[in-house]
Image: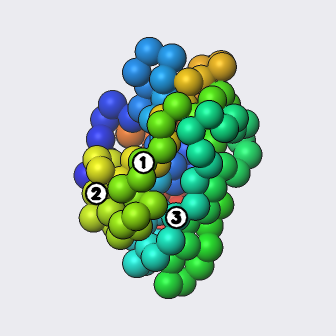
Amino acid sequence: MNPKDLKYSKDHEWAKVEGNVVILGITDHAQESLGDVVFVELPGAGDSITAGKSYGTVESVKAVSDIIAAVGGKVIEVNETVVDAPDTLNSDPYGDGWLVKVEADDLSPLNSMMTVEQYEAFLAEEAH
């Protein structure tokens, strides 16, 4: 089940806003599509990322996928658990499988993201 308090992108990524800090991750649908995740590449703390641009990759037994930033800003924390145990993305994409925390320089890109209801409707359409 997709949590209601998150924003969702058409790239199957999620964002959780806590003040001006945004936590980013991939959705359950994304990890299911990828299959077993074997490697995650993320930026380092202190690096800057740009909204709409790739900030890392997730590699599975099937493919390598770019992770697209929902917002731009400075990475203030990286989830080392996911780097050390990439399968955490498969088992808990909304909990322990978060990717980075970003001090956002502009929250407005989040306005174009979907609510959980919109995202689930998008998934249903995509399945047809």
Dot 2 alpha-carbon crowd within 10 angstroms: few under 14, some 14 to 19, many 20 or more: some
Kindly identify the amino acid type of the residue bearing the numbered disc 1: Asn
Label 2's element?
A: loop
Alpha carbons under labels 3 and 1: distance apart: 10 Å
Q: Which mark is residue 40?
A: 3
Q: Is residue 11 left or right of residue 5?
A: right
Kindly identify the amino acid type of the residue bearing the numbered disc 2: Asp
Q: Residue at x 29, y 41 (%)?
A: 3
Q: Looking at the picture, how far across and down is residue 89, in whole percent?
A: 37, 62
Viewer-nearest of discs 3 and 2: 3
Q: Earlier in the sequence, mark 1 or mark 2?
A: 1
Alpha carbons under labels 1 and 2: distance apart: 13 Å
In the rendered view, would you say 64 is above or below 81?
Answer: below
Alpha carbons under labels 3 and 2: distance apart: 15 Å
Q: As rendered, which of 37 and 107 lies closer to the eye?
A: 37
Viewer-nearest of discs 1 and 2: 1
Which residue is under mark 1?
A: 79
Q: Looking at the picture, how far across and down is residue 93, in whole percent?
A: 35, 55
| Residue 25 visible from this viewpoint | no
Which residue is under mark 2?
A: 92
Kindly identify the amino acid type of the residue bearing the numbered disc 3: Val
Q: Residue at x 40, y 64 (%)?
A: 84
